Amino acid sequence: MNDDHELLHAWRSGDPDAGQRLIERHLESVHRFFSNKVPGSTDDLVQRTFLACVEAVDGFEGRASFRSYLFAIARNILYRHYRERHQAFDPLTVSASTVVVDQRSPADRVTELEEQRLLLRALRALPLELQTLLELAYWEGLADRELAEILELPAGTIKSRLRKARQQLEELLPRLARSPGLLESSRQTLEAWAAGIRDRTGIEGGGRRR
């Protein structure tokens, strides 16, 4: 039983082992989702995400992939976390760098290369919605259709926001690079950078944009 939907069906039919296997399968991805967006430990947000998933599992209708469903829950948990701290929180304008005061995140702490830390800092300087889009697209390899399901937006809007996010990222990198040499050594495609971060942090399951 390897398919997410099969595991989910068994879980809903009363098989707790299937639910445990489904959660374990996606645990690393959910940790990764929060790792470059909040300071300190991500454990509480991860636990809240899976608790919400368990409580709402009967509401999953199967139109989206289980990953899309899970990341949509994680996104809602993340935004609730921000709204508890910032009354005027708007994911289209507020960036993670406003709360990661020391400019380091859990993702930074397991990333050895300065070029990759530069990318993580640049991602955190983007509005949170754009950061989320890029990280789900390039770290997790989610298709535009899946991103549209997570953000509840038309696919065309997803494409335009991804273009905007990549453009803003390119504009941020020269401002954040500590030296011309660092910036020059970091001039790779976003896919290559994401692959490097996956390799350095033990991230699996991500892929090229499709």
Image (spheres, rainbow, N blue to C red):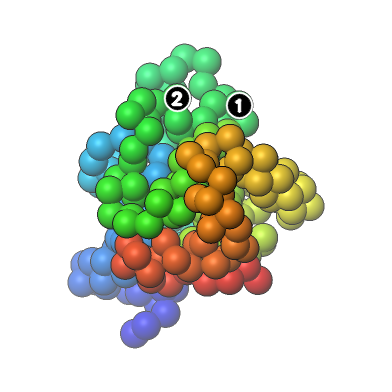
Q: Nearer the viewer, mark 1 or mark 2?
A: 2
Instruction: Locate residue 166, reporting x and y percent.
Output: 67, 49
- Residue found at the very far top of the displayed protein: 87
- Mark 1 crowdedness (10 Å alpha carbons): few <14, some 14-19, many ≥20: few
Which residue is at the front of the view, 81 or 14? 81
Q: Up-down: is 44 above or below 54?
A: above
Which residue is at the front of the view, 144 or 175? 175
Q: Which mark is residue 93?
A: 1
Instruction: Locate residue 133, reporting x and y percent.
Output: 58, 49
Q: Earlier in the sequence, mark 1 or mark 2?
A: 1
Quadrant location of the N terminus in the rendered image:
bottom left
Three-letter amino acid code at the position of disc 1 = Thr
Q: Residue 57, can we see it?
A: no
Q: Secondary structure at mark 1?
A: loop
Mark 1 touches mark 2? (CB < 8 Å): no
Q: Up-down: is 165 above or below 64?
A: above
Q: Is residue 152 left or right of residue 71?
A: right
Q: Disc 1 to disc 2, how far (Cα)?
A: 11 Å
The residue under label 2 is 98
